[in-house]
């Protein structure tokens, strides 16, 4: 059968830019999510994803013809007809705008994507105590895990949908030979229809909007402690707060911030002070009272740091106090090879400050992790 050679200009320049920005930012977001210390980059990329999805919605109201929601085809009978025709007629005439399948795809991806971004944004506030929603951390830390699961579920759902979309485009490209891949590059589709026109107003608003999104994302990534990333947990000067605590507890190892264990655990540790991992702390009664009091009033129960919350949940019915023996600690650090803990820089697991540089100031942010994986074993 003859190929239909008609061409229609369907995707505007800005529409295509926004589409490819979405592609790049979504995939980079996905990849960076696997690295704790790339959290700020992940957030910045998430801003681009969110920005481009919002643009899709607004562009669908004010943009050129085929990008408009009113041009989408959602009727289920059209969807059925679309697939029947696709199977029956390999070289069928395609429509210029969204076909029923891509209409549904664009609609669902946009909304799932927006919910995914919002869940991430809320999670960043609740779980990490970071960003504009950090004030939610105090009250809602217990919802963090549930929300985290929703966020991850949506991300994978989007990934599956995108894989389906790409498969669909490739089928168009190689089986139906409609050269669909080029449509999102050149803007032209091999279909009969009316070319779009982009007005000056659309071009102006669209380009300013894309620029603004990129500037906000870049700012978020580059400027430390900005309104989008600022943590509510500020470094604590434990030495100034209680010199005895600092002096007695940082002699043999790094200082452990009191929020890392529940009060019962600290009490038990002081009870066992003469057998502290083979050492005798030799603290007299009054000093024990003083330091213990300092620690138990700042223990895990009173902190809404993610680590404090998780450790408290795990240890609250026991009085265990070896942090590195908690499941929470073990799971987080499970991917770190044994030799890294034993190399000449880290030396042992409990030397937290080797990798969490502001550990002794009570800061264990994701982004503050230095991971000395290149150092060799001594
Ligand atoms: C005389 C040396 C010494 C002093 C002083 C000392 N510790 Fe320790 N502490 C140790 C040793 C040794 C270990 C075991 C370290 C290891 O397993 O790497 C340990 C382990 C710990 C751990 C568990 C670390 C883990 O693996 O999870 C905590 C928590 C801790 N100490 C808190 C304290 C506190 C609080 C004080 C102050 C009251 C204190 N230590 C004072 C020697 C000391
Ligand atoms: C060899 C380096 C290393 C040492 C030593 C180390 N950590 Fe970590 N820690 C990491 C890395 C890397 C991560 C991020 C893991 C990941 O990919 O999720 C991490 C993550 C964490 C987190 C989670 C941070 C968050 O916001 O999600 C906590 C809490 C933590 N570590 C506590 C500790 C404590 C307490 C100690 C000492 C008892 C310790 N770490 C020792 C490397 C280390």
Image (cartoon, grey):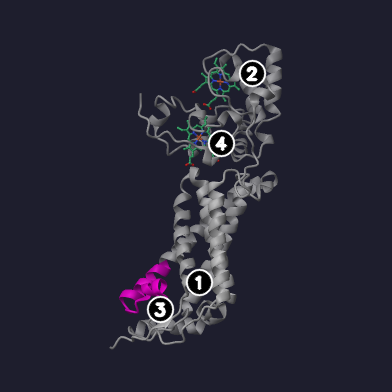
Could you tell me how far apart the alpha carbons at marks 3 and 2 are, in whole angstroms? 77 Å
Q: Is residue 361 visible?
A: yes
Give the CA separation, mark 1 to mark 3: 19 Å
Residue 152 screen position, x and y as percent: 52, 54
Q: Residue 232: which quarter of the image? A: top right
Tally the marks.
Answer: 4
Instruction: Give residue 364's mark.
Output: 4
Q: Is residue 192 on the magenta stretch?
A: no
Residue 6: x and y in percent read: 37, 86
- Left or right position of 265 against 207: right
As drawn, 348 above or below 147:
above
Q: Is mark 4 within 8 Å of ligand 2?
A: yes
**What residue is shown with label 2?**
271
User: Could you tell me what secondary structure mostly forms the magenta stretch?
Assistant: helix
The mark closer to the camera, 1 or 3, is 3
- Residue 111 visible within the image: no
Q: Is residue 192 left or right of 124 when viewed as pictured?
A: left
Q: Which mark is residue 47?
A: none
Left or right: where 336 falls relative to 316: left
**What residue did someone put label 1 on?**
106
Q: Position of residue 208 (x, y in %)?
A: 56, 65
Along the viewing direction, whichever of 249 and 204 lies nearer the viewer: 204
Which residues make up the magenta segment? 164-188
Q: CA distance from mark 2 to mark 1?
A: 62 Å
- Nearer the camera: disc 4 or disc 3: 3
x, y (%) of residue 285? Answer: 69, 13
């Amino acid at each position: 059968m003859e190929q239909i050679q008609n061409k229609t200009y369907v995707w505007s320049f800005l529409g295509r830019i926004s589409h490819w920005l979405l592609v790049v930012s979504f995939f980079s977001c996905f990849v960076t999510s696997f690295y704790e210390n790339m959290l700020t980059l992940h957030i910045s990329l998430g801003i681009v994803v969110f920005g481009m999805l919002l643009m899709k919605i607004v562009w669908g109201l004010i943009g050129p013809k085929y990008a408009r929601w009113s041009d989408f085809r959602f009727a289920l009978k059209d969807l059925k007809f679309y697939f029947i025709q696709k199977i029956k007629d390999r070289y069928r005439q395609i429509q210029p705008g969204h076909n029923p399948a891509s209409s549904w795809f664009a609609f669902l991806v946009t909304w799932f994507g927006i919910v995914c971004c919002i869940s991430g944004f809320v999670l960043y506030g609740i779980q990490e105590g970071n960003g504009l929603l950090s004030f939610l951390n105090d009250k809602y830390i217990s919802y963090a895990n549930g929300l985290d699961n929703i966020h991850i579920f949506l991300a994978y759902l989007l990934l599956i949908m995108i894989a389906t979309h790409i498969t669909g485009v490739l089928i168009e490209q190689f089986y139906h030979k409609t050269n669909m891949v080029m449509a999102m590059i050149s803007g032209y589709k091999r279909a009969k229809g009316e070319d779009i026109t982009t007005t000056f107003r659309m071009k102006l608003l669209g380009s300013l909007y894309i620029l603004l999104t990129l500037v906000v994302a870049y700012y978020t990534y580059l400027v430390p402690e900005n309104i989008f990333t600022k943590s509510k947990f500020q470094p604590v000067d434990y030495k100034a707060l209680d010199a005895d605590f600092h002096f007695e507890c940082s002699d043999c190892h790094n200082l452990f911030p009191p929020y890392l264990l529940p009060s019962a655990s600290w009490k038990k540790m002081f009870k066992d002070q003469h057998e502290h991992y083979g050492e005798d702390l030799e603290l007299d009664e009054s000093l024990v009272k003083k330091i213990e009091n300092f620690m138990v009033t700042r223990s895990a129960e009173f902190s809404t740091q993610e680590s404090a919350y998780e450790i408290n949940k795990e240890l609250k019915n026991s009085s265990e106090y070896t942090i590195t023996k908690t499941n929470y600690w073990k799971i987080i650090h499970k991917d770190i090879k044994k030799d890294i803990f034993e190399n000449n820089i880290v030396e042992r697991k409990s030397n937290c400050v080797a990798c969490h540089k502001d550990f002794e100031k009570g800061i264990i942010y994701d982004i503050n992790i230095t991971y000395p994986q290149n150092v060799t074993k001594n």
